[in-house]
Image (cartoon, helix red, strand yellow):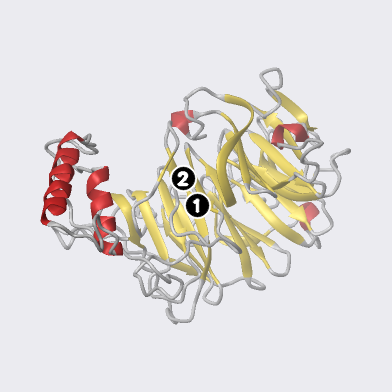
Amino acid sequence: MAVVTLAAVARLGRRLSGLGPGRGHWTAAGRSRSRREAVEAEADAPVFQYVGERATRADRIFVWGFSFSGALGVPTFISSAACGYGFTLLSSKTKDITKVWGMGLNKDSQLGFHRSRKDKTRGYEYVLEPSPVPLPLDRPQETRVLQVSCGRAHSLVLTDGEGVFSMGNNSYGQCGRKVVENEIYSESHRVHRMQDFDGQVVQVACGQDHSLFLTDQGEVYSCGWGADGQTGSLGHYNITSTPTKLGGDLAGVNVVQVATYGDCCLAVSADGGLFGWGNSEYLQLASVTDSTQVNVPRCLPFSGVGQVKQAACGGTGCAVLNGEGHVFVWGYGILGKGPNLLETALPEMIPPTLFGLSEFNPGVQVSRIRCGLSHFAALTNRGELFVWGKNIRGCLGIGRLEDQYFPWRRAYLLSHVCALLERQLTALHGGPPWKCQWVPAWNPVGPQQSPAL
């Protein structure tokens, strides 16, 4: 319980400033009267009770001042965040020993091994707060983590000089290693390193049970579950346990971005071209084929879209962002143009006015887009976040549980957004690249601050 009185605060201020009553004209009667008035004022002051009567006080340490050097013990800035099926990974580009934190579901060791405090031989299947994820780095004080990505039950960690690390379920080879029959993934210490790429990996992306890798040579590799063709391997729909270079229409193309989350994949080329492969049951690739499973990357020559700058690929819907900051959507589900548009094989542009463009704000345009399985997120050049789609378990964070058919603005200035299954993570805007020291996770009411890392 906290008791606050204005009189007490005023009295303390007078003592500190030396400007108390009667300064220069002090008398015993004046002192007695001022004390009596203070006591009466304090007795009449309201009591503000902020916690329950049975609550016990917890010891806390408060710090302030210059925090950039870490002298205050404040956690380092978060540079990448990713959500999987019930779990989350955070990473920082720090050179400290701890570079990655995980929380949430860990039944397949997708967050690594977290030793139980009660039984040192056992590990936790649920990690309830951000906890360090150990990586077998050769140079832990030199190597930086650039990006993290999460799938259904596996994770990828991209470093700047020691390759890509994978953790979690490898039933379909999605971790880039040989599938071991009847392998037990719970409480596993296994962290696999992948380095056999022609060039350095610059981006990783996890699908449900497959993985994509983009190198600095503009080449795309894949591994994992391929029943829908999502690994893009020529001529078959089998699993692929070794990262394999993709061909098809991607052969010789300089790719700058890959996107996946469900079982469909998209790639953006340096000249603004768009390519797709994988699942097409929801019209994702229906513009070029009638097949519902495509195991070869195909060029998607959409007219009227212009040069594609960025792509996002969810479970049933897709989105692209062109060079003018316009968002185009297609596929199936709530796509962002109201309840009358639930499926389309060709991209349709969401009116820019829905993202804040007006005669008073003529320079507003979308700068980033992301997809979850059934919802979307877009970030504007003004740091405003817009969300729409299925609002499963309040994943949109709009203060209610109803689905959202149009882009809805969230009242936060952001620099990065990661929109994934049933929840989202946002990084608060704090200067380039993404200098943030806390990451809110959204519930049906709105964002909540995550515990300290």
Residue 15 spot, x, y in % from top left: 24, 60
Residue 384's place in the image compared with 170, above or below, is above
Residue 140's place in the image compared with 51, above or below, is below
> What distance separates the C-alpha of mark 1 from that of mark 2?
12 Å
The residue pinned by badge 1 equals 82
Q: Residue at x 24, y 57 (%)?
A: 22
Residue 375 spot, x, y in % from top left: 58, 34
* Three-letter code for the amino acid on which mark 2 is drawn: Arg
The residue pinned by badge 2 equals 152
Residue 433 spot, x, y in % from top left: 60, 63
The image quarter containing residue 50 is top left
Count of residue discs: 2
Q: Report if residue 315 is visible in the image.
A: no
* Three-letter code for the amino acid on which mark 1 is drawn: Ala
Q: What element carries label 2?
A: loop
Which quadrant holds the N terminus? top left
* Front residue (pair 353, 196): 353
> Is residue 111 shown left or right of residue 6?
right
Which of disc 2 and disc 1 is earlier in sequence?
1
Q: What element carries label 1?
A: strand
* Front residue (pair 56, 204): 56
Are there few (<14), some (14-19), or many (20+) residues within 10 Å of tag 2?
many
Are there few (<14), some (14-19), or many (20+) residues within 10 Å of tag 1?
many
